[in-house]
Image: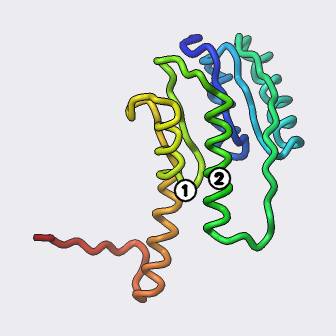
């Protein structure tokens, strides 16, 4: 296919790894940049992707990159949000300039905030900056509300507002 020349994936855990695998398998980018704090995980993903690329004759090249971000035990939600906000700003700044046909996929939390920051920093239209990850957050919230309301989490309440 080769429709995108370069794709960078920041965070190659389960979601990022699956995205990288599918992109490489389908020869979508000519170059795939993998960025992760955990170097062993990133290197393992690169080795696995190299096998996929070899066995499928994909034309994708995989490049490693490092992003250092320290995790502190006991950090608060505010700390977590602040840390991830700083990270997305640094990553977006490092990726500049963006081509007009760039499509950004943000898979991070809090996804709405980070997607908004990415869109603003990239200067791209909203249709080209996509955030994903809210389903898990929605289910967590749903579970917490159900627990407090003594309801089953599959129940739904609908109503009309004026």
**Mark 2 and mark 1 in contact (Cβ < 8 Å)?**
yes
Residue at 70%, 23% (x, y): give it.
32
Compared with 6, 36 (above or below) is: below
Q: Position of residue 49 (x, y in %)?
A: 78, 27
Q: Position of residue 52 (x, y in %)?
A: 76, 23
Is disc 1 placed on a helix, strand or loop? loop
In this rendering, position of residue 156 left or right of residue 96: left
Residue at the disc numbered 2:
84
In this rendering, position of residue 140 left or right of residue 78: left
Residue at 82%, 36% (x, y): give it.
66
In this rendering, position of residue 66 left or right of residue 83: right
Q: Looking at the image, tell me whether mark 1 or mark 2 is earlier in sequence order.
A: 2
User: Which quarter of the picture shows residue 152?
Assistant: bottom left
Q: Nearer the viewer, residue 19 or 95?
A: 95
Q: Nearer the viewer, residue 3 or 111?
A: 111
Is disc 2 placed on a helix, strand or loop? helix
Residue at 44%, 71% (x, y): give it.
142
How crowded pointer 2 is (Cα within 10 Å; few <14, some 14-19, many 20+) is rated as some
The quarter of the picture where the C terminus appears is bottom left
How crowded pointer 1 is (Cα within 10 Å; few <14, some 14-19, many 20+) is rated as some
Q: Position of residue 131 (x, y in %)?
A: 49, 43
Q: How far is the residue under mark 1 from the one under mark 2?
A: 8 Å
Extreme left residue here? 162
Residue 110 marker: 1
The quarter of the picture where the N terminus appears is top right
């Amino acid at each position: 296919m080769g429709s995108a020349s370069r794709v960078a994936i920041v965070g190659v855990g389960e979601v990022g790894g699956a995205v990288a695998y599918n992109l490489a398998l389908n020869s979508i980018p000519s170059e795939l940049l993998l960025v992760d704090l955990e170097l062993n995980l990133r290197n393992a993903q690169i080795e696995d992707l190299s096998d996929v690329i070899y066995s499928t004759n994909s034309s994708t090249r995989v490049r490693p990159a490092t992003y250092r971000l320290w995790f502190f035990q006991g950090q608060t939600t505010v700390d977590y949000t602040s840390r991830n906000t700083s990270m997305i700003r640094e990553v977006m700044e490092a990726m500049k300039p963006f081509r007009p046909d760039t499509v950004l996929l943000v898979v991070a939390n809090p996804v709405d905030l980070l997607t908004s920051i990415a869109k603003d920093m990239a200067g791209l239209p909203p249709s080209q900056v996509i955030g994903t990850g809210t389903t898990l957050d929605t289910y967590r919230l749903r579970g917490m509300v159900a627990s407090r309301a003594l309801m089953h989490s599959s129940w739904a309440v609908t109503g009309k507002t004026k």
